[in-house]
Image (cartoon, coloured by chain):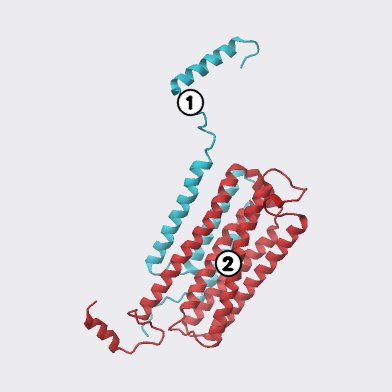
C-alpha cells in the first residue's frame, strides 16, 4: 500500500470503533468474524477428539451404547434440545434486531438466550445428581448394580466427559451473555458496530450444534 | 455508514427454528423404530442436516463471505480424517495378527494339509 493511500485514509473522518490498522469497518468486521470461525474450528476439533473416543468404543462394544442409552432420560435430553434450539433462535434474533438499531430487541433476546442457557444447566444438574444418586459414576467409580455389563462404565466416562465439557461451554456462554447484556445496557452496540454480539452468537450456535449431535448419539440410539 | 451486512429476515429465522424442532421430533421418532444398526446412520444423518441448517441460516454462512465457509470446510475435512484414520486402526485390530515368517502360500498349504488330516480322523471338521 503506497503512502498516498494511507494519507487518503487518514484524511477521512472515520468511526470511533474503527481501529487504526483496518481500512474500513467492513474489513474490521470480516477479520473479526473470520478469526472467530478459526477459533470455532478448534472448538469443533476439541469435540472431535471425544467423538473419536465415542466412535471407537461404539464400534468395539455397540451393545453397551444401546444399554447405556436406556439409562438416560430422552425426555430431559429432548427438552434440553428444544431449549438450546430456542436459544439459537433468540441469539439470531438479537443480531437481527441490533442490525436494525433496535437496542430493546437486542437486550430482550440476550436475556431470553441467557434464561435458556441457565434452564439447560439446571436440567443437566438434575440429570447428573440423579445419576450420582444411583451410583452411576464415570470409569472405575461406576456402582450401579442394575446394569453392570462389561464396558458400561466406559460409556458413562464418555457421557460425563462429553456432556460435562459441553456444559462448561454453556456456562461460559452464560458469562458471555451477561457481558453482552451489560454492554448493551450501556449502549455500546449500534447498527454500525455490534461485532461482539455477532461473535458470541456464532459461539453459541456451535454449542447448539455440538448438542444436536450429542442428544441422539447418547440418549436415543 | 456503508454497511453491506445481510440482515436475515425474521420470517427466515422463525422458519429455521420450526424446521429444527420438526427434525428433532423426526430424530426421536426414528429412534423408536428398531432398525438395528441402521438407527445410527439415520440419527447421524438427521443431526448433520440440522447442523447444516443452523450453520446456513442462524450462522448466516449462506449469505456470508465464502472464506468463512472455507475455514469450516477445512476443519470438517480434518474431523473426517481424525475419525476415519483412527477407525482404520481400531476397527481392524486382530484381523492381521498372525505374523508368520512363512509365505501366505506356505500357510495355506499347511492349513489345507491340516484340514485334510482332520477330515480323515474320527468326527473331524
- Chain B drawing hue: cyan
Along the line of sight, the residue nearer the viewer: A182 or A72: A182
Along the line of sight, the residue nearer the viewer: A155 or A80: A155
Q: Look at 59% across and 9% down and name the residue there.
A: B120
Please determine whether, in this image, residue B59 is positioned above or below residue A26. above
Describe residue B7's horizontal placement relative to residue A146 as left or right.
left
Task: Give me the disc on residue A169.
Answer: 2
Q: Nearer the viewer, mark 2 or mark 1?
A: 1
Badge 1 element: loop
Q: Quadrant of residue A132?
A: bottom right
Q: Quadrant of residue A31?
A: bottom left
Task: Give me the disc on residue B100.
Answer: 1
Q: Is residue A18 visible?
A: yes
Task: Give me the disc on residue B85.
Answer: none
Is the Cβ of the residue at disc 2 closer than 8 Å to that at disc 1?
no
Where is residue A112? Give x, y as percent. 61, 77
Please determine whether, in this image, residue B33 is positioned above or below residue A38. above
Q: Look at 50% across and 77% down and name the residue there.
A: A197
Where is residue A69? Give x, y as percent. 67, 52
Along the line of sight, the residue nearer the viewer: B43 or B101: B101
Along the line of sight, the residue nearer the viewer: B14 or B110: B110
Q: Categorize mark 2 by other alpha carbons within 10 Å: few (<14), some (14-19), many (20+).
A: some
- Chain A drawing hue: red
Where is residue B29? Give x, y as percent. 64, 55
Describe residue A211's horizontal placement relative to residue A198 as left or right.
right
Amino acid at each position: 500500500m503506497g503512502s498516498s493511500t494511507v494519507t487518503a485514509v487518514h484524511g477521512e473522518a472515520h468511526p470511533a470503533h474503527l481501529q487504526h490498522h483496518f481500512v474500513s469497518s467492513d474489513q474490521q468486521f470480516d477479520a473479526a468474524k473470520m478469526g472467530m470461525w478459526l477459533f470455532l474450528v478448534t472448538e469443533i476439533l476439541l469435540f472431535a477428539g471425544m467423538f473419536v473416543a465415542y466412535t471407537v468404543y461404539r464400534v468395539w462394544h455397540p451393545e453397551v451404547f444401546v444399554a447405556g442409552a436406556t439409562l438416560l432420560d430422552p425426555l430431559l435430553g429432548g427438552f434440553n434440545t428444544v431449549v438450546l434450539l430456542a436459544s439459537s433462535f433468540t441469539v439470531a434474533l438479537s443480531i437481527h434486531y441490533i442490525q436494525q438499531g433496535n437496542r430493546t430487541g437486542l437486550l430482550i433476546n440476550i436475556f431470553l438466550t441467557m434464561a435458556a442457557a441457565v434452564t439447560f444447566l439446571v436440567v443437566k444438574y438434575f440429570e447428573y445428581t440423579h445419576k450420582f444418586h444411583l451410583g452411576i459414576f464415570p470409569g472405575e467409580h461406576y456402582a450401579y448394580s442394575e446394569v453392570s455389563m462389561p464396558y458400561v462404565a466406559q460409556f458413562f466416562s464418555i457421557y460425563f466427559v462429553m456432556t460435562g465439557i459441553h456444559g462448561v461451554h454453556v456456562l461460559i456462554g452464560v458469562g458471555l451473555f451477561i457481558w453482552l447484556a451489560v454492554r448493551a445496557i450501556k449502549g455500546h452496540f449500534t447498527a454500525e458496530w455490534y461485532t461482539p454480539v455477532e461473535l458470541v452468537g456464532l459461539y453459541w450456535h456451535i454449542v447448539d450444534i455440538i448438542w444436536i449431535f450429542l442428544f441422539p448419539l447418547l440418549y436415543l440410539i | 455508514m456503508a454497511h453491506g451486512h445481510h440482515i436475515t429476515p425474521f420470517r427466515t429465522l422463525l422458519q429455521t427454528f420450526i424446521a429444527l424442532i420438526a427434525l428433532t421430533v423426526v430424530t426421536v421418532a426414528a429412534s423408536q423404530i428398531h432398525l438395528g444398526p441402521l438407527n445410527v446412520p439415520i440419527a447421524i444423518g438427521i443431526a448433520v442436516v440440522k447442523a447444516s441448517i443452523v450453520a446456513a441460516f442462524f450462522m448466516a454462512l449462506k449469505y456470508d463471505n465464502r472464506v468463512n465457509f472455507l475455514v469450516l470446510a477445512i476443519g470438517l475435512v480434518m474431523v473426517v480424517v481424525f475419525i476415519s484414520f483412527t477407525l482404520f486402526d481400531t476397527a481392524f485390530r486382530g484381523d492381521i495378527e498372525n505374523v508368520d515368517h512363512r509365505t501366505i502360500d506356505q500357510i495355506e498349504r499347511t492349513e489345507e494339509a491340516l484340514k485334510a488330516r482332520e477330515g480323515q480322523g474320527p468326527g473331524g471338521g
